[in-house]
Image: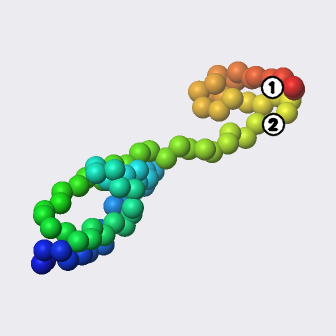
Amino acid sequence: MNSGANGNAVTALPDGGYHFVQWSDGSTANPRTDTNVTANVSVTASFAANSSGTPVPVMDGWWLLPGILAGLGIFARRRKE
């Protein structure tokens, strides 16, 4: 690349369950294209785990706890607010 030219677009691709946060130089552009490049640039992408944000279904009245508690036959009652 010639001095002062623009670089190619680079995209940080997270693994499943993660999302892109930022590059090590603080840039949050993704993809990023460095412009007017006059020196070598080395950056690292940072990623963070996605929050599950998955609501847990709850029924009114009596319900059976999942997993090992269900195997033990333990029940719980949700109190109505």
Viewer-closest of 10 and 13? 10
Where is mark 2, residue-wise? Answer: 59
Q: Earlier in the sequence, mark 1 or mark 2?
A: 2
> Residue 14's x, y, as percent?
38, 56
Q: Is residue 26 above or below residue 8?
A: above
> Residue 79's x, y, as percent?
84, 23
The quadrant of the rendering that contains the N terminus is bottom left
Viewer-closest of 22 and 57? 22
Amino acid type assigned to the residue bearing label 2 in the image: Met
Q: Is residue 76 above or below residue 2?
A: above
Element on which disc 2 rests: loop
Q: Residue at x 39, y 61 (%)?
A: 29
> Residue 54's x, y, as percent?
63, 45
Would you say 36 lies left or right of 69 here? left
The quadrant of the rendering that contains the C terminus is top right
For residue 78, the mark is 1
Viewer-closest of 58 and 33? 33
> Residue 66's x, y, as percent?
65, 32
Dot 1 alpha-carbon crowd within 10 angstroms: few under 14, some 14 to 19, many 20 or more = few
Q: Residue at x 41, y 50 (%)?
A: 21
Q: Residue at x 28, y 49 (%)?
A: 24
Viewer-closest of 79 and 11? 11
Amino acid type assigned to the residue bearing label 1 in the image: Arg
